[in-house]
Structures are given as structure tokens and as C-alpha cells.
Amino acid sequence: MVTQIIDVNISSQYAIERSCEILSSGGLILFPTETVYGIGCDLFNKNAAERIYKLKMRDNRKPLAAYIDKMDKAEQIAQNIPNSFYKLAEEFLPGPLTIILSAKSIIPTIINCGLDTIAIRIPANEFMMELLKGYEQPIAGTSANISGNPDNSDFCEALKPFEGQIELALKDQKSIKSGIASTLISLAFDEPII
């Protein structure tokens, strides 16, 4: 397999269209966020999610996150959403914050590892927000690295372990700012846990 590379700063509309084709056909994409590069697939495609775990050598007890473009899409995949989610989201999202909520039963077991939770991420990356809006489905994702290795904010380093094994890599080196993965907070229990 040859991994197609698209610089989203040169051809963002084509990058969105091609990403939607790849995701809807069960493929994997390498994508930018405001922090690090991620690797992802359609949230509801179990086979594609299995490929992510295999390629990353990821522990199958570590869930993937659901990337969405706006808060109301959380209601499609999460339930019993507390008011604190909306307060945090209004203050910090889009941005480098991942919020864990109680999952609806539609979430495939491989995504949340059989837990009754789902991690929600709304990235502050202009291209990713447009892709998530255009695709209309959540994207399941995690950092683009082999498990246990550092997260990658450099496109070439992020792509290296996956080149030739994923369908599409989206380059957006201008928009990645911190290189530090997002903060994780759980609202799925009685008390918030960071």
C-alpha cells in the first residue's frame, strides 16, 4: 500500500473530500490536531479500529477517543451528560482537553474497550474542524505513535512508523502548536477526575 500525503494548507478541500472517502471505506488517516498528530478511523468501523490497535501495538484495554466538531454531537454518542461538560466545553473547547463521559450502547466495544465511557475530543485545529464537519460522523483516534513512544508534533516522525500501512496522511505543520497531548478529565463518575 502507498500512503497518500496531502498538505492541507495547499489543498484543504481536496484533503477533506479524500479523507471522507478513506474514512467511509474503512481506511485509516493520519491527522493534525493543535497538539500532536493522531491516527484515526470512522468511530463505528470495528475492523478499522482493530487496525489502529495492531499498527500502534496498543494495549487493547486502552480506549480510543471520539473526535467531534461541536458539543451537540457528544449527545449522539454519550448519555447522562452532566452540566459540567457544557461548562468545560464552553470555556475550553475547541482545545487540548479530552472529556470522558458515559457512553451510549452504540459505541463499539473495541473503541471503549468494553467500558461504559467514551472520551470526547474537539480539536482546535481549523482543518480538523472542517473535516469533522464534512464527514458528519465522529472519528475514533489516538496519538500517531507506536505505543510507549513519545507523541509526535512533527509530521515526518508521526508518519514514519505507519507509512505504507495507512491510506492517507494529512500534513499541517503550521497549526500544531504545543506538542503536548491534551489534558484528560473524566466526568463519568460522581466527582471529576483529571
Image (tube, rainbow, N blue to C red):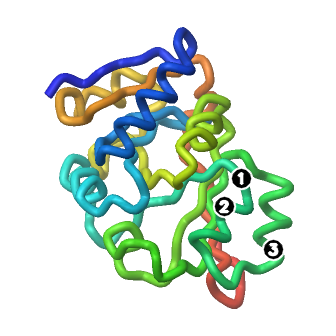
Residue for badge 3 = 84
- Of the image marks 3 and 1, the number of the one nearer the N terminus: 1
Depth check, front residue: 19 or 117: 19
- Residue 171 x %, y %: 46, 21
**What amino acid does circle 2 point to?**
Lys
Which residue sits furthest bottom?
190
Taking the image as shown, residue 9 lies to the left or right of residue 154, namely right
Residue drawn at 35 percent across, 20 percent down: 156
Report the quarter where the C terminus lies: bottom right
Report the quarter where the N terminus lies: top left
- Of the image marks 2 and 3, the number of the one nearer the N terminus: 2
Numbered tag placed on residue 73 in the rendering = 2
Taking the image as shown, residue 87 lies to the left or right of residue 47, namely right
Depth check, front residue: 57 or 71: 71
Task: Identify the secondary structure beneath mark 3.
Answer: helix
- Residue 59 x %, y %: 26, 65
Q: Check the image and report above or below for 62 versus 51.
A: below
Q: Check the image and report above or below for 126 versus 28.
A: above
Residue for badge 1 = 70
Residue drawn at 42 percent across, 51 percent down: 142
Disc 2 and disc 3: Cα gap in Å? 16 Å
**What amino acid does circle 3 point to?**
Ser
Task: Identify the secondary structure beneath mark 2.
Answer: helix
**What amino acid does circle 1 point to?**
Lys
Disc 1 and disc 2: Cα gap in Å? 6 Å
Task: Identify the secondary structure beneath mark 1.
Answer: loop
Disc 2 crowd, CA 10 A, few/some/many (<14, 14-19, 20+): some
Dot 1 and dot 2 residues touching (CB under 8 Å) = yes
- Residue 114 x %, y %: 36, 81
Residue drawn at 42 percent across, 82 percent down: 115
